[in-house]
Amino acid sequence: EHEYYIFRRGTYKVGRKGCDIIVNKDKGVSRVHAEIIVDEMICMDHLPKRHSNNSSEVRIRDCSKYGTFINKNLGSREKVHELPNRETMLKDGDIVAFGTGNAKYRFLFVSLVFFAPSFEINQLQDKMSLIGATFTRTWTSKSTHVVLDDFVQIGDDIIDAIVARKPLVRFSWIELIAGTTICSEIPSSLSHAPTLTLEGASLKVADPQSREQCLRGYTFLLESIHKYKFKEKLQLLLDSASAKVVYAESQDPCSQNLGDNQVCVLPAGSTSSNGGFSKFNSVHTVKEMELISAVVSGHLDPSVMASAPGKYFAP
C-alpha cells in the first residue's frame, strides 16, 4: 500500500473508493471505512506539557462493518468500533489495521524543523503553524531543512547543514507544503533550491544526493587545517561528498608547492592501502573555495584544477 502524508488540519476518509486514502489490499475494507481527523498540526519535538503521552492530536473514527483495529507499541490491541463514539486518539508508532487485518498502516509523526537564520519571524510563523512545523535561528542537528533567501552568503552554519546532508530550500517550498492537504509523497524541493553566494560567485544548491557523490574517486591532500578559511570544516565537507582526504607532512614536496588556501589533488592510485603514497610525476591543485563551490553545486569542474608539474615523492 502507498504511504500518505497529511499536511493540514481536517477530516480524511479511508476506504476502497472515492476516499483520500485508498485501501485495496483487504476485501473487508468498506467503501468508506474510517475517518482520520486531524484536530491540530503540532511538532512532536516541541510539545508543551499539556500534550501528554505523545498525543498527536489525531483521531481515528471507524465507519465500517468489519471494524478498525489499533496495535499499540506495548502489544495491546484496540477495537476502535467498540470504543465510545467508535473513535480513539492515534499516537506515534500505532499500527492501524482495517477490515480483516490484511491492510495495515503505521502512524508516524514526521517532524519538520527548519533552520532559518535570516527570515522574519512573522513570515515564517503563519506557514509553520499550518503544517505543524517549527523553526530555529541557531543551527542544530535536529533541523530537518534549511530555509534561505537567494544570494545569502555561505558561512559556517550553512557549511554545517551541508555536512549534515540537509536539504536547503527557499521559502516557496514551505508555501507549497502549506498549500498541500494530503499526498502520497513529500513534494520535491528540487525546483525550490536557493542560489547562494561564495566570495562573489553565485551557486545553485544541488540536492543532498548529488552533493554526496560529487567528489567520489578524488583524493585530496590537505595541510594544517589552520591554513584554510573554513579550517576543520573543509575536511568534513570533503568527506560528505565522498572524497578521500589525507594530510601532508611538513616536509612533503606536495605541500611545499602549495599556495595559500590551495589543496593538492592526488592522481588515482597514488595512495596505497596502508595510507602511504607512491611515486607520481605531477599533481593538480585546486583552491579551497572551488572545492566548497563543487560540493554546494554538486559538480567539480576539472578546468578549475591547475597543473603543478615536477616529480613528487611521498613517503
Image (cartoon, rainbow, N blue to C red):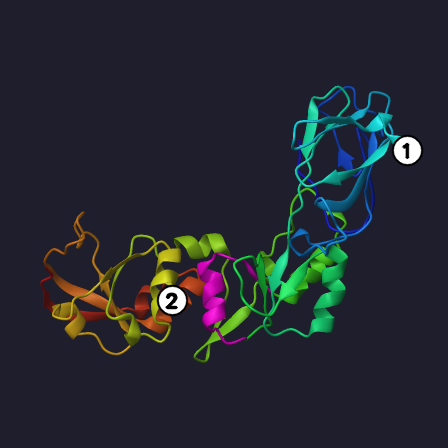
Q: Residue at x 18, y 53 (%)?
A: 275
> The residue tagged with tag 2: helix, strand or loop?
helix
User: In the drawing, does residue 212 fall left or right of residue 264?
Assistant: right
User: In the drawing, does residue 206 fall left or right of residue 86?
Assistant: left
Split into 4 quadrants, where in the image is the N terminus? top right
User: In the drawing, does residue 299 fall left or right of residue 120?
Assistant: left
Split into 4 quadrants, where in the image is the C terminus? bottom left
Real-space CA distance between mark 2 and mark 1, rounded to the nearest whole angstrom = 56 Å
Q: Residue at x 39, y 65 (%)?
A: 294
Q: Is residue 253 above or below residue 207?
A: below
Q: Which residues are magenta?
A: 152-169
Q: How many marks?
A: 2
**Which residue matches tag 1?**
85
Check residue 179 for magenta coloring. no
Residue 35 position, x and y percent, is: 83, 36
Residue 50 position, x and y percent, is: 77, 53
Give the image quarter of residue 245.
bottom left
Q: Which mark is residue 262?
A: none
- Give the residue type at disc 2: Lys
Q: Which one is nearer the viewer's eye here, 4 or 59?
A: 59
**Which residue matches tag 2?**
233
Q: Is residue 99 above or below residue 130?
A: above
> The residue tagged with tag 1: helix, strand or loop?
helix
Q: Is residue 202 visible?
A: yes
